[in-house]
Image: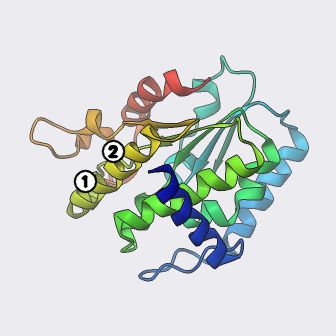
Amino acid sequence: MKFTIALIAATFLSATAGVVAAAPAVQSPTARQWDDAFAAFAADDAIHPHPPGGVLFVGSSSIRLWSDLEDQFATRPVVIKRGFGGSQLSDCVKNLSRLVLRYRPRTVLVYAGDNDLAAGIAPSEVLRRFAAFVDGVHATLPATRIAYISIKPSPARARLLPQIRSANALIHDYAENEDNVDYIDVFTPMLDADGGARRELFRKDALHLNAAGYALWKRVIAPHVR
């Protein structure tokens, strides 16, 4: 399993030569769209320098919109939030140096893959992208622990539940067979008795989490913040 995934990830990274190829379906926002987000990250770094060995949260809008994330995990001396809304896992890989490596974190928690599936990306490709992310981090920071926060079951994306389940299962199995990789299951506790998304955990847009949703995430994720 490790050899197969490593080969897939190496092929993925080699083909992009450090830049992830465009998605075959709906495109994620252009690289320039992230300029403002990364400029804001750099400005925050200048004001609040982050020593190495911290806990880094990266990913899409579910990370970006977690307004009190740093306070929720205040027991850790260094907690860094680096979410950029609308991003896909491929964007995390493409921006690995300025998103992750520059901080030299002890732990990286990743929420991404949701937008990939919404753009028509297959679950197997979501796995390949995550494997490329892991290999990219561990090539420079082999001791860094990487925890994948499972794709949530948003009511607005109910039609994608089969793909979400598949992608989560693939990444769960991958994490089971990799060193320093964890899988965090927020998907299951966000389901109601009928197997659908618990709407009380979401904002009016039925896509992003509300305070109750983030409280649930905090309970589930907290044991992995170390």
Q: Considering the numbered disc 2 on the image, is that residue within a helix, a strand or a loop?
A: loop
For residue 65, say whether it is visible. Answer: yes
Q: Which mark is residue 155?
A: 1
Q: Quadrant of residue 80?
A: top right
Give left or right: position of 79 versus 45: left
Which residue shows up at 75% across the image and 43% down it?
Answer: 141
Residue 212 location, x and y as percent?
37, 32
Marks 1,2: beta carbons within 8 A: yes
The residue at the point 43 percent across, 67 percent down is 125
Q: Is residue 96 above or below residue 27?
A: above
Q: Residues within 10 Å of mark 1 (few under 14, many from 20)?
A: some
Image quarter in which the C terminus is found: top right
Is residue 87 visible from the viewing direction of this image?
Answer: no
Q: Which mark is residue 132?
A: none
Badge 2 crowding class, 10 Å Cα cut-off, few under 14, some 14 to 19, many 20 or more, is: many
Q: Which residue is mark 2?
A: 202
Residue 157, quarter of picture: bottom left
